[in-house]
Amino acid sequence: GDSVTQMEGPVTLSEEAFLTINCTYTATGYPSLFWYVQYPGEGLQLLLKATKADDKGSNKGFEATYRKETTSFHLEKGSVQVSDSAVYFCALDQTGANNLFFGTGTRLTVIP
Amino acid sequence: NAGVMQNPRHLVRRRGQEARLRCSPMKGHSHVYWYRQLPEEGLKFMVYLQKENIIDESGMPKERFSAEFPKEGPSILRIQQVVRGDSAAYFCASSPMGLEGDEQFFGPGTRLTVL
């Protein structure tokens, strides 16, 4: 069945450090891939998405590339800020279904 | 354009009571999804509804849980005879078309605590 494996947290970085959160997936067919962010006490917000192989999603300085050959969708940001502290979820939409399958989330804390 | 609204934000119930969680989708959205997030875990899909129809309930527990999305009014997730293991955050999301790859817009969630 479909699955999403995310880098385990928590991750603590200093401000302006480089961020990578790994995400790999297994899926039948060609799912769309997503990164959602959850700030404390809030619901999830879509950060970026990619719908086909080699697509790059980007938003707010974050980016991720849909790599079919390595079944990965790693999230990167060149210089993190304190305001980026949140939980990040990698997700895919299961082929033929209308629901999202989430990874377990990675908690990021950025310290000044 | 208001986002997805959920209420209540926090709900406390004793074991054996009923919990009713409400979700109003974004304006113009007719597709609603419910997810459950257990502590320190990712979200797990529960059910997908369109107006007056349950499309996919493959993630719903077979007993005590039910969901509806009537023609008028919000979608309701109902948990009967709650147990401590039901304590979680329940998130509702909506989308306009229900197509693969569509963005789902999430509400702020209802945090259910069962004493």
Image (cartoon, coloured by chain):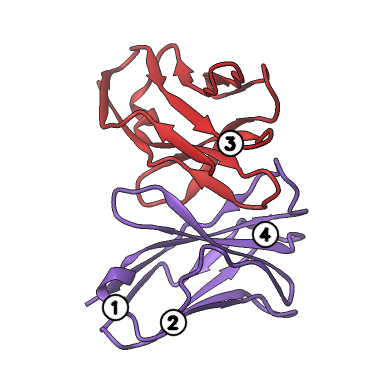
Circles 1 and 2 in contact, beta carbons < 8 Å:
no
Of tags 4 and 2, the one toward the viewer is 2
> Marks 3/1: CA distance?
34 Å
Compared with B109, A2 (above or below) is above
Q: Which of the chains bears the disc numbered 4?
A: B
On the image, numbered disc 4 is attached to which residue?
B26
Q: Residue at x 42, y 23 (%)?
A: A22
Of the residues shown, which amino acid type is indicated by label 1? Val
Between B8 and A33, the one nearer to me in the picture: A33
Of the residues shown, which amino acid type is indicated by label 2? Arg
**Badge 4: few (under 14), some or many (20 or more) residues near its Cα, within 10 Å?**
many
Q: Which of the chains bears the disc numbered 2?
A: B
Q: Using residue B51 as the reference point, say whether residue A78 is left or right of it.
A: left
Q: Residue at x 46, y 54 (%)?
A: B44
Compared with B72, A67 (above or below) is above
Q: Which mark is residue B64?
A: 2
Q: Position of residue B89 (x, y in %)?
A: 38, 61
Circles 4 and 2 in contact, beta carbons < 8 Å:
no
Of tags 4 and 3, the one toward the viewer is 3
Q: Using residue B104 as the reference point, say whether residue B60 is left or right of it.
A: left
In the structure shown, which secondary structural element does the residue marked by tag 3 occupy? Answer: loop
Lower position in the chain sequence, tag 4 or tag 2: 4
Q: Where is residue B55 in the image (x, y as percent from the top left)?
A: 69, 66
Residue A52 placement: quadrant: top right
Same chain for labels 1 and 2? Say yes or no.
yes
Q: Residue at x 71, y 48 (%)?
A: A96
In the structure shown, which secondary structural element does the residue marked by tag 1 occupy? Answer: loop
Q: Position of residue A94 (x, y in %)?
A: 62, 45
Q: Which chain is red?
A: A
Q: Position of residue A36 (x, y in %)?
A: 50, 38
